[in-house]
Image (cartoon, rainbow, N blue to C red):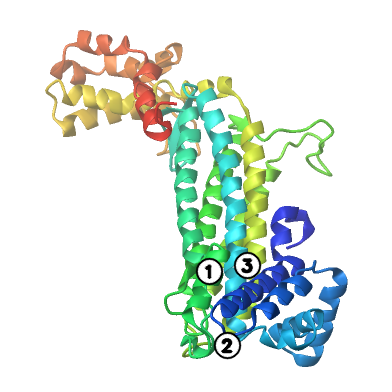
Amino acid sequence: MIPRYSRPDMVAIWEAANNFRIKFLIEAHACDAQAELGVIPKESARIVWEKGDIPYTPERIDRIDEIERETKHDIIAFLTELSEQVGGDDARFVHQGMTSSDVNDTCLGVQMSQAADILLADIDKVLAALKDRAMETKLMPTMGRSHGIHAEPTTMGLKFARFYAEFSRNRERLVRAREEIATCAISGAIGTFANVDPRVEEYVAKKLNLTPEPVSTQVIPRDRHAYYFATLAVIASSIENVATEIRHMQRTEVREAQEYFAPGQKGSSAMPHKRNPILTENLTGLARIVRSSVVPALENVALWHERDISHSSVERMIGPDATITLDFALNRLASVIAKLVVYPENMMKHINEFGGIHDAQRVLLFLTQNGVSREDSYKIVQRNAMRVWTSFGIDPDNPDTPAELDDVEKEAANHDNRLFFFLSKDEGLADVMDMAELNKLLDVDSIAYHTQNVDAIFKRVFGND
């Protein structure tokens, strides 16, 4: 990944120094296991640690690269340089009975586990930010939308709580994906253990906090890796889910929330007035990059017979790119959420913008509970809701001309709750129910009605916190 979207800790996992260090640990632990089994001298295993356990400096890495240019084989280059460090007769006991995939696949499992640990910590930051904002805005009313259209009131806190629950699921998914990928293969050519005792694999796995792969066939099965990258993609999609909501709320005509705009920040090279949702737009793009790893990871599952290396070039790219990108995106998201500026007055303005039309279902249910059929109730409420639209000059039948208003529709402009005003004038409604009952319904605060179960939802999400 380019430095612009990279964080040092995650980058370090994929750098050559960490890669070769893990590979050395695999070989050295295998030597210890071989020595315990009497396959190689214990003194030779000790010398491997003593002379080989030194930092992978740029000079050592350059030497490995130099050897690989000649051998055209990465593991042989690594082993040749290690033999130069160990020296003497003891170097010949390194890599006894093992094959290249034992080292490469086990190393990749360690790296992906290390990456998952960082990503889990990143998700914890997102969860903490979401929880703080959810508690802060728990009962802050805002208009809920379906299909982008005003539906019924909700709260800003419920938006944050919804995202918190989603990222909690993502955390559980990533824990499972980490378990899935943290496997070890030290089974030799074709994975039959013909040339290496299975106890060597068990020993190395324990030392590296991995699980022995039940059947490695010379490579660790790639369904595990596909599951891992698919999980990263789901997390990326959740990031985009939050980002899209914020981008909508920041639109000028909505302006219910916006990304923090720092002193000295510039929004446009041409238009000095602009405050653009650049961070959440960036997160939307980064999510696409992470998701792009899924199809190649799935196609890596089908390999020829007991092994081929068609997966190798793919993983050398998507391993670093997907994890580094997601690490950056999660940290950016946590910051965006923590600093998000919200505008409760605009939220309330939008709730009240269309004359109580959002209470249509509330009236519908009231009618059905008071003896009116659902079909008749729907007709009564809908025809009055449509008059509310018309009273605001919105005529869907004649979009090119202003709506023609009758006297009642003109009078509705003097009432805050136009829906109830039209209902009170509806002769059909008067035929089926006592208007005093409707007035009783009007006395119940609309916001309190729609938010009456927020506590119950919060308890489901956050427990008793």
Marked residue nearer the N-terminal end (2 or 3): 2
Residue 97 is marked as: 2
* Circle 1: residue type: Ala
Residue under label 3: 319
Q: Given this view, does label 3 or label 1 mark the residue nearer the observer?
A: 1
Assign a secondary structure to mark 1.
helix
- Counting from the top left corner in percent of width and height, residue 274 is at 75, 37
Q: Nearer the viewer, residue 309 or 76?
A: 76
Residue 7 showing in the rendered view: no
Q: Report the residue at 72% width, 65% height from top.
A: 18
Answer with the quarter of the image where residue 319 lies: bottom right
- The residue labelled by disc 1 is 205
The percent position of residue 130, horizontal first and vertical second, equals 54, 35
Query: x%, y% of residue 106?
Result: 58, 73
Residue at mark 2 to residue at mark 1: CA–CA distance: 16 Å
Left or right for 200, reference 252: left
Distance Cα–Cα, label 3 vs label 1: 21 Å
> Which residue reaches farthest right?
59
Image position, residue 354 (x, y; %): 45, 24
On screen, residue 313 above or below 160: below
